[in-house]
Image: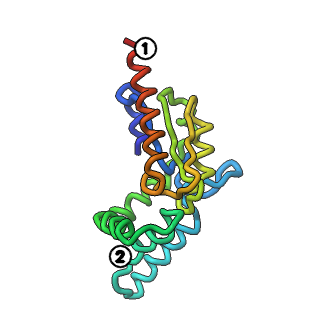
Amino acid sequence: LALLAAYAAPALVKGLLLTSAAPWFSGERDGMAGGVSEDFLRVMISQRRSAAGGRDAYYAELCYELGSNWVFHRQQSPGVNQAMLDQALEWPQYVLNAYAEDMRGIDHRTRAPTLRIPTLIVQGRHDKKQRYEGAVHLARMIPGARLATLEHSATMGNVEEVEAFNRELLQFARELAGRGKAAA
């Protein structure tokens, strides 16, 4: 969504911080896998099919599985897992499904190389949900983009490696502030 905003109104965007990003939603393009993994999509689809079979609380189970199997590289405390579940359950399932359907058609390969906006992509190396390779490819596509790899994280690097994530964010914010002073 941040990329779409940057394409639509680049003058209003001072910088882009993208996390768990890729040039397309899912699958393989140009011989490269990127975006949401097929394994994760299979889990989501099987949960939807289970719902059709009358299984109780299937959406809550999907949200629980998201936190316990997909977004973290290391086991988290019960409190972190509960917070993840609570946050996921705030999104109604129909919103999540509609979002996924809308995103399926997104392909940034033609527009990403036209961006002239400072960009930082932060990606966990062990992300099973949103594949690391997609972030690497996107960083190569956007002129001047920098990829910051969180070596001990999956999707939720801001939780698993708080200090490293914040350090990257602070450095990027300082770079953006420095650009503003140089332009003045």
Residue 104 pos. (x, y %): 49, 56
Residue 103 pos. (x, y %): 45, 54
Q: Nearer the viewer, mark 2 or mark 1?
A: 1
The residue shown at (68%, 51%) is: 32
Residue lying farthest to the right in this orientation: 31
Image: 10 above or below 157: above
Numbered badge on residue 60: 2
Q: Quick check: 28 left or right of 171? A: right
Image: 138 above or below 53: above
Numbered badge on residue 5: none
Q: Amino acid at mark 1?
A: Ala
Query: Of helix, strand and loop, which one carries label 2?
Result: helix
Q: Quick check: 89 left or right of 134? A: left
Q: Earlier in the sequence, mark 2 or mark 1?
A: 2
Give the labeled residue for mark 1. 182
Q: Quadrant of residue 5?
A: top left
Query: Of helix, strand and loop, which one carries label 1?
Result: helix
Residue 152 pos. (x, y %): 56, 56
The residue shown at (35%, 28%) is: 12
